[in-house]
Structure formats: C-alpha cells, structure tokens
Image (cartoon, grey):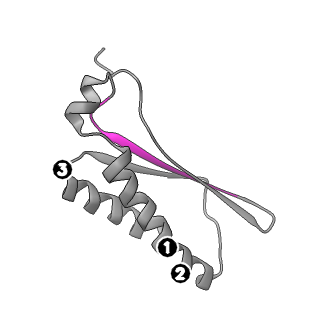
Amino acid sequence: SISDRLYGVVRQAAKDSGKQVKLDITGGSIEMDRGVLDRMGPAFEHMLRNSVAHGVESAADRVAAGKVGVGTISIHVNQESNDVSVDLREFGPRRSPMA
C-alpha cells in the first residue's frame, strides 16, 4: 500500500512548512503492478509536497480568506477496466464552521 507513505509525506511537509494540512484519499482499494506503483510513488510524493508548499496557505491566511485553518489535499482514485485515474486537488470550505 502506498497510502501510508503518502500520509507520511503530507504530515512531514506540513510540519516542515508550519502549516496545518490533512490528506483525504478516496476511491477504494486498487490493485496495481508493484513495478508501476514503485515508479508512480515518487511523482505522487512530489505533487503532495508541492501542494503543501504552494497550494495550501498558512492557517492565518486561510482564516483571513474565510476558509477553515486546516487545508485539505484530496486524492480520488478510480479504476475502470485497465485504466486508473487520479484526481489530486487542494480545497477547503469558503467559510469557517464558526461563520
């Protein structure tokens, strides 16, 4: 499973940057050839580190923009036949729950 590794990458990148970020992975379990997964892993890790560094604002900036303080990175994986699609995005509610 690569998911534990990806959660760890986001935790470490958030800690290094002083940001609050959570990772949501949805789409269920998909079986892939180990060689393909090993080649894709570093690319996923790079995208996640970049998402934390450049796609998620600091908690103070997020709150000032009307968002919740914790940023969310979402990965949705879908498999249809032999094709696998991956949707990675950073998003959050426009208003904090207190608003």
Q: Nearer the viewer, residue 83 or 3?
A: 83
Q: Secondary structure at mark 2?
A: helix
Q: Amino acid at mark 1?
A: Gly
Q: Earlier in the sequence, mark 3 or mark 1?
A: 3
Q: Which mark is residue 41?
A: 1
Image spot of residue 33 (x, y percent): 65, 81
Give the alpha-carbon distance from disc 2 to disc 3, as whole Å: 29 Å
Question: Does residue 28 sit above or below 99 in this rendering?
Answer: below
Q: Amino acid at mark 2?
A: Asp
Q: Around disc 2, counting alpha carbons within 10 Å, would you say few (fewer than 14), some (14 to 19), or many (20 or more)?
A: few
Q: Which mark is residue 55?
A: none
Q: Around disc 3, counting alpha carbons within 10 Å, would you say few (fewer than 14), some (14 to 19), or many (20 or more)?
A: few
Image spot of residue 96 (x, y percent): 32, 23
Q: Is residue 35 magenta?
A: no
| Residue at point 48%, 65% (across, down) | 44
Image spot of residue 6 (x, y percent): 41, 65
**Quadrant where the image shows the C terminus:** top left
| Residue at point 34%, 40% (across, down) | 71
Q: Secondary structure at mark 3?
A: loop
Taking the view exactly as shown, the residue that stands out farthest to the front is 54
Q: Does the CB distance between marks 1 and 2 fall below 8 Å? A: yes
Could you tell me what secondary structure mostly forms the magenta stretch?
strand
Q: Secondary structure at mark 1?
A: helix
Q: Which residue is mark 3?
A: 18
Horizontal arrangement in the rendering, residue 78 relative to residue 63 (left or right)? right
Start-end of magenta stretch:
68-78
Q: Which mark is residue 38?
A: 2
| Residue at point 31%, 29% (across, down) | 68
User: Where, by quadrant of the figure, is residue 14 drawn?
Assistant: bottom left
